[in-house]
Image: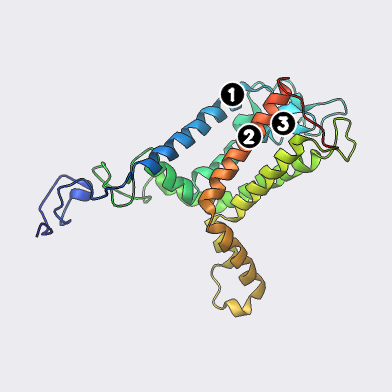
């Protein structure tokens, strides 16, 4: 029948008493499209964010600070009214602040269940797609170093809450003009608002958040508030992949918008 166990020793999914199917896989659709598109999208973000993080310039245009550099720890964020951000590190700070700042959201995104799936498939072909055998000889899952470190995701969720809090603060400050008068609204304010909504939606859609909110309960009926919140988080959680991409794109757009303003390529249209 072609399905008898075969004593293969080629390793990986061909090892042991797996079904003896000689074809690499039986999929006839364009299964490679999703991992290829995912890899291309992630690569584009990595190239863009690396350029921006190392450029150490054009990240502040009052009242906006790039999300890659927030909270701004450098003197560069000083404006006419004293700067909305901390200048904890003076002008002696030579390394780009983004290198430090980005560790926090990166720790959350790199260990995210969705991004794990995305880069395991897109970059490591492990597996390339559902029902397509991976080329690797052995498989240890996430049981060994370094992948066992993916378990820190549940803690990085709290880090992500802090990051979202900081970006919320920046969004609130975008309602002030460069002289710190409230009531300002520019196109950048809208860009920041869209970004922060997507950042919060992505953060709350996290699988760890869902467990923190509604996990380890014996009876939902005895915890009506948590049950209701769990329902909301569950709805977001069903869109986790879409929110991961939307917020990744929005954060890059917000940074690029600040770059355009700070580099003088564009000036922020004031809406009121
Ligand atoms: Fe994706 Fe937590 S699972 S952010």
First in sequence: mark 2 vs mark 1: 1
Image position of 186 with respect to 205: above or below: above
Q: Look at 28% across and 44% down and name the residue there.
A: 134
Q: CA distance from mark 3 to mark 2?
A: 22 Å
Q: Nearer the viewer, mark 2 or mark 1?
A: 2
Q: Nearer the viewer, residue 259 or 137?
A: 259
Q: Residues within 10 Å of mark 2 (few under 14, many from 20)?
A: some
In this image, 201 relative to 36: left or right?
right
* Residue annotated with mark 3: 73
Q: Are marks 2 and 1 in contact (CB under 8 Å)?
A: no
Q: Secondary structure at mark 2?
A: helix
First in sequence: mark 3 vs mark 1: 1
Using the image, tell me which numbered label, if any, was put on residue 213.
none
Give the x, y percent position of residue 142: 38, 50
Asked whether residue 162 appears in the rendered view, the answer is no
Q: Residues within 10 Å of mark 1 (few under 14, many from 20)?
A: few
First in sequence: mark 3 vs mark 2: 3
Q: Look at 53% across and 49% down and name the residue there.
A: 242
Q: Look at 62% across and 64% down and name the residue there.
A: 232
* Residue annotated with mark 1: 54
* Residue annotated with mark 2: 253
Label total for image: 3
The N terminus sits in image quarter: bottom left
In this image, 115 relative to 100: left or right?
left
In this image, 45 relative to 137: left or right?
right
Give the x, y percent position of residue 57: 67, 22
């Amino acid at each position: 029948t072609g399905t008898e166990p075969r004593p293969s020793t080629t390793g990986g999914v061909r090892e042991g008493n797996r079904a003896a199917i000689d074809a690499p896989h039986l999929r006839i659709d364009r299964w490679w499209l999703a991992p290829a598109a995912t890899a291309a999208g992630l690569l584009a973000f990595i190239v863009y964010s690396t350029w921006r993080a190392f450029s150490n310039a054009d990240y502040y245009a009052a009242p906006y600070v790039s999300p890659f550099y927030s909270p701004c720890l450098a003197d560069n964020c000083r404006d006419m009214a004293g700067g909305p951000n901390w200048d904890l590190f003076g002008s002696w700070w030579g390394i780009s602040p983004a290198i430090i700042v980005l560790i926090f959201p990166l720790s959350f995104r790199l260990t995210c269940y969705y991004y794990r799936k995305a880069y395991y498939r897109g970059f490591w072909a492990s597996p390339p797609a559902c029902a397509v055998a991976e080329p690797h000889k052995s498989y240890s899952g996430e049981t060994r170093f370094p992948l066992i470190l993916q378990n820190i995701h549940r803690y990085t969720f709290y880090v992500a809450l802090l990051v979202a809090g900081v970006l919320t603060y920046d969004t609130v400050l975008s309602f002030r003009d460069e002289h710190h008068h409230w009531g300002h609204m520019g196109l950048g304010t809208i860009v920041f608002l869209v970004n922060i909504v997507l950042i919060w939606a992505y953060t709350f859609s996290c699988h760890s958040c869902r467990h923190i909110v509604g996990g380890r309960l014996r009876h939902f009926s005895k915890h009506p508030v948590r049950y209701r919140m769990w329902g909301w988080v569950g709805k977001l959680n069903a869109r986790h992949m879409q929110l991961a991409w939307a917020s990744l794109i929005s954060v890059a757009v917000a940074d690029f918008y600040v770059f355009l303003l700070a580099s003088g390529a564009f000036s922020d249209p004031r809406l009121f």
